[in-house]
Image (cartoon, rainbow, N blue to C red):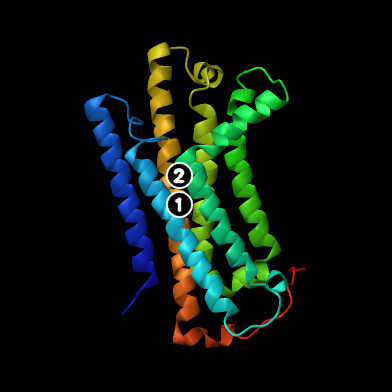
Amino acid sequence: MFRPRRLLRSIIVANLALIIFAVVLGLAKTGNPSRYFGEGRFTTGISCAQLLGTAVFAFQLFRVRRRGLRQPMLRSPHSVWLLAAGGFVFLACDDAFQLHEQFDYQIRRAFHLPKTALTDHIDDALIGLYGIMGAAVFWICRREVLRFRHEMQRPLLAGFVSLLLTVICDAVANNRHVLFALTPDVATAKWLDGWLSMGDGAFTLLAEGFFLAAFALGWLAAVSPAASSLHGDGQALEVAP
């Protein structure tokens, strides 16, 4: 018999195993725990795969919830799942092609901003903005999202917490002002920077794993025989009070 907790546990354990492998490999080869995290590393491929998998489950959830309805798609409360699918496809493209880094450069160029300790982290702020936008969409459409609260609530919350930790690690890593404020020793600051960069990559993978599990569990709940009461409620898009 299928057990939702087993699926969630399997996805998170797989991500933890990947993180440990990447850290050990980085330490063994270069002494840097973050060596195999970030753009162009094998963890990037896993990251993109998780994001695209989440998009697939979100789209399938949208299809199941829209089944048999005739109202305009944009007025349907179920469109939140389609928006989520599009958002995760965008995030996969961002991860593969480093879009937020390019946005960072274009913003500084457009406003003639010098590269400082603050403006050098615009790309970190963009990642945080992605998370805020996603949370805002779920909040606005929470009446539909809460139909799957028993399946999705905890992994979604864990995903957003992991995303917040990603932003914090990324903002501190490679920021010499913060690192030297934490420790005046150059060697210690460099050591700390490596582990913070690793934390950035590790929490990113965990966040994606939690989101993947959440949407997989939501889809499985929607197609289960017990979910028949969820279908056919094609009301106009309602914003929860």
- Please indicate whether residue 67 sits to the left or right of residue 108 in the image: left
* Residue holding disc 1: 208
230 vs 164: above or below: below
Q: Mark 1 and mark 2 in contact (Cβ < 8 Å)?
A: yes
* Residue holding disc 2: 204
Q: In the image shown, does 39 or 226 lie closer to the viewer?
A: 39
Picture quadrant of residue 38: top left
Q: Is residue 129 visible?
A: yes
**Relative image position of residue 124 (x, y in whole percent):** 57, 34
The residue shown at (28%, 48%) is 17
40 vs 182: above or below: below
**Relative image position of residue 129 (x, y in whole percent):** 63, 43
**Relative image position of residue 61 (x, y in whole percent):** 52, 71
The residue shown at (51%, 65%) is 58
Q: In the image shown, does 89 or 142 lie closer to the viewer?
A: 89
* Amino acid type, residue under disc 2 in the picture: Thr
* Amino acid type, residue under disc 1 in the picture: Glu
Q: Is residue 162 visible?
A: no
Picture quadrant of residue 135: bottom right
Secondary structure, mark 1, is helix
- Please indicate whether residue 1 sits to the left or right of residue 218 in the image: left
**Relative image position of residue 208 (x, y in whole percent):** 45, 52
Q: CA distance from mark 2 to mark 1?
A: 6 Å
The residue shown at (49%, 60%) is 55
